[in-house]
Amino acid sequence: MQLVLPDFDVLAADSVETACSMLRAHQGMAQFLAGGTDLLVKMKLRKLMPRYLINVKGIPGLDQINCDGDRLRIGALNTIQAIQSSETVTREIPMLSRAAGVLGTMPIRNLGTLGGNLGNASPSAEFGPPLLVLEASVRCLGQGGERMIPMTEFFLGPGKSALHPDEMITEVHVPTPPNRAKCVYLKHSLRKMDVAMVGAAVLMLLDGDVCRDVRIALGAVAPTPFRARKAEAALRGSKLAGDRAESELLEEVARIGSEESSPIDDLRGAASYRKRIVGMLVKQGLAQTIARARE
Amino acid sequence: MKHDIQLQVNGQRRAMTVESTRTLLDVLEEDFRLARTKEGCGIGECGACTVEIDGNLSSACLVLAVDADQKNIVTMEKQTAGMPGFHPLMEAFIHPDDGARRTNFASPGVKSSAEVPTFCHLCPAHCSMLAIVEDGKVVDLEPEMESGLYAEQCAVNKGRFTIPEVLGHKDRLLYPRKRVGARGEGKWERISWDEALDTIASKFNALKEEFGAESVGFGLGEPKGMEFAFAQRLASAFGTPSVVTPGWCCGIPKGMGAAFTYGSGAVCDDTKTPALIVVWGVNMAHTTGGLRRETLERTLETGGKLIAIDPQKTYVAKLADLWIRIRPGSDGALAAGLLKVIVEEKLYDQDIVDNWTVGFDKLREHVASYSLDEVEKLTWVPRRQIEAFARLYSQTKPAAMHIGNAVEQHLNSFQTARAVCIMRAICGNLNIPGGDVFLTPPPYTRPGSFFLLNKYQDRRKAKKILGDKFKFAQQSAFIPPHVMNKAILDEEPYPIKAAMFILTNPLVSWPDSAETHRALMKLDFIVVSELFMTPTAAMADIVLPAAWGMEHEELGYWPGWHEEIRSYPKLAEPPDECWPDTKIINELAKRLGLTEDFWGDDHEALDLMLKPSGLSYEKFKNQRVMKPTVEYRKHYFPTASGKIEIFSERLQKLGYEPMPLWKDLGKVKDAPEDYPLLLTNGKEETFMMSGFRHVASMRLVRPDPLVELHPETAQKLGLEEGAWVYIETATGRVKQRLSLNRNIDPRVVIAAFGWWFPEKDEPGYGWAESNINMLVPGGPDYDPATGGATLRGIACRVYAA
């Protein structure tokens, strides 16, 4: 049969405060409606049936993208497509713009929002790995006031974020990477338009022939997107001389990254297959960023 | 909650009041009557509903109508309305991201890439596709828009997404295996093809010796290429009439109804544009073995009308000028009501009735014996709708009437088909351009003759198993499934000891799964050829890994009533040791000593099929298709009398009612107190029957079986939406997840079809948990002409799990 939506009322919020108080007032029976590309799908499939949808798209000021010198402030209501095509993002953090570009298809990117992608907190959230390596933080507002949640503390489990039940994401702060850092986001999926089966973001800061800093984040291969700390530790500070020792080291780092992941079996692929892909993407990510750093 | 909005769609501004829950897509379909923008998956995956909102392409199924207020909406119709077929501008909306649908098999740096025209083999619509082949792998199937052949894929693009994924799927069966351990235990040992086929042949021959060839049965599904024909040919040469096919619930009731009324099958004339289309129990946005979605779009865009008959508010129901929300199971009664109105209001073509019918007076007398009130009571359709339907259909020319499988799945389906054919014929919609027309087949070997039925009529004796019953089954080379189960379980009229199944999953798709399971357990020997391990394959003694469409050269002629033959080129190597079914059957036949009727190589049969055309298969591949011609012969009825036989002496001689009667058409069982609701279902949009639950890209669209109830019914029963509920009939019970839908009648339950769970780590994959056929009795009663059982409108109850 074709899918109909369950019963609900949609309420329009005109400010973040109103939205949060509506959420509080209908506790447990309401959800924010931004792009709807995750929420309405869950509702049609009867996974979630909120009685009230609080439409936040009318709240002004949440779709800006600003550059404050050393960081970007991206409003939560920016659509994925807006992030992809933003001159500011493309100039300051091209990896982020490219990550936005591989999410779904255009008709989805034009509806879905950054706030929604994060709030949905899927293990395969497309912005998870990129924002983790960029060490971004999420600004949110709730009854207790405003706070910043570092990305590393944001994802708690599949579909679960650190947001309190009455909080709304308003902005994401993304520090611009250090000048000579190179970043990449690689995604493996069955079809390009699919959700990632494995996502890997790498940030590499090469200082001469020393890896000054490396950050590796993986998505879709654990209950949440996460930083592969052990893999990073095995590489950080190491000498990279462009020789056989280097490629062996990168293999080892990739293997450690793969070990750190805990993917599941599903219709798309076995856990073992996914682990192999983790290794491949980490290795590719490292190789690519190192090569670009050396140019 | 209601909202006042202003919508601007393709330049047309309209003020409306909409409920919170209405999507923009709903409004575009129902209020703006857009026919090309449609719902496929409903969750933003397929692109069928893509519209431009303030310059941005967006999935209309995920936009609330309220959110479209004051926005400038442009749809694909703006530039493509009125175009005859599927146009690149439509595809530009549906699939704007070049390459995004390609399956990621190819290693980085593609070495070879080819685009090859072919056809989808998933459903009988066989849309023309352009296969994108990279490094020997099919990675995408784009609509092929150059040839002029039908290219608009089903809304959800199930072929496009399913086929590449299946061709490279990690769970494909790769080698023959035999059972070790108990039947159904799930323990296998790999064997060679030689061992597999030798075992099967010696088993079959031994049984033939001891119990007769009829003790070996075959179960076949819907033809894709030539495999069905090969299996029928094998059955004939081997000498067994014990062959189950889907004919009893698909094609035969309609085909026989037509044959006995006007002497030939008729199909909707897609080559012209009807002024009225009737869509009865079918939804061609998703699956069609007949009228094309392009034809419907064209009809509506040129001001044509649409009548849809369906218990569900499908795409066609939303667009219809008249949506008849029929009580499941009462199509015969509706047909009787329509005939009554047409006859009594003299809406028929006078000349045709006066000069070209036999038995009209009998019909006129008979329709007086029942009332429209009775029809209304049985069908739940208000009499004014029945009248409106009859008047519109008889007075609008040309009118094409497309009857779906749903109408063929009752005890009275043959007589219902007869009534519909009579209606069609006396209203003058037969053999007129844009109506329903006879086809003259192009020159290729008739499938029936390929089956060698005539050559081996002394070996393959249908009478042995069917006796005097179900004569149309006998004539159409099949037995209904309940006959096979009975022969296995009760050994009546003779024992069936072994069975071979191809293209089919009987444990999930035959009525009364529990009985089918007992039958499979009782068999001595089961062979299954399959793409994946399925609940039926799990019960086999030998499982053979099948190659699929695009993995070998093929001809497809299905659906037979469209009299068309197509070439399907080989595009990829089959994985590992997979063999196409035609090869499996060919090699088995040789080992059974039937070399006379088979070949050195199974592909030699392709030339045989094309022989009457003078073309070899290789030559034919250049033109890809041979189509029938339409002659529009007026007053041409190749029946015994040369006229439209409202009353058929031939039927009378066969022992069947010579004219459709109210006593049969009005046969609708009441729901008893303990099972007060009526169960029905539709075809799954995302899957093919019980197949392809493994396909990740489709499974995410319909991850689990949903059952629909009206909110009031659910409330009365104290049921929670989203929870698993039991659906129970006198035959069995299953669990499905509850979804509430105001659009259905509160007395109806719409369940999901064909569910089992390949991801379940247990032999049998949960075949009894959510499978609707656990609920469906295999009969008696049966349609006396075809042996069919009733699949729709079964009394049931629903309660919390």
Image (spheres, coloured by chain):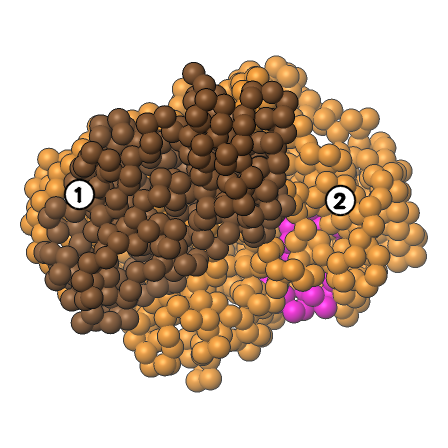
Chain coloured brown: A
Mark 2 vs 1: CB contact within 8 A: no
Residue shown at 24% from the left, 65% from the top? A166
Residue shown at 22% from the left, 42% from the top? A74
Q: Colour of chain B?
A: orange
**Which chain letter goes with mark 2?**
B
Residue A72, x across and y down, in percent: 23, 38
Mark 2 crowdedness (10 Å alpha carbons): few <14, some 14-19, many ≥20: many
State the residue in front, B725 or B754: B725
Inspect the image, locate mark 1, and give the three-letter code of the amino acid beneath it: Asp
| Vertical relation: A148 (above or below) B576 | below
Residue shown at 8% from the left, 48% from the top? B6
Residue A73, x across and y down, in percent: 21, 41
State the residue in front, B427 or B789: B789
Which quarter of the figure has residue A175?
A: top left
Query: Which residues, given as a range, are shown in magenta?
Result: B499-520
Residue carrying label 1 = A63
Have a look at marks 2 and 1 and say if they share a chain: no
- Left or right of B399 in this view: B542: right
Q: Is residue B777 visible?
A: yes
- Left or right of B620 in this view: B547: right
On residue B544, the disc is 2
Task: Say what secondary structure mark 2 lies in.
Answer: strand
Mark 1 crowdedness (10 Å alpha carbons): few <14, some 14-19, many ≥20: many
Q: Is residue B424 visible?
A: no
Which quarter of the figure has residue B210?
A: bottom right
Task: Say what secondary structure mark 1 lies in.
Answer: loop
Q: Quadrant of the N terminus of chain A?
A: bottom left
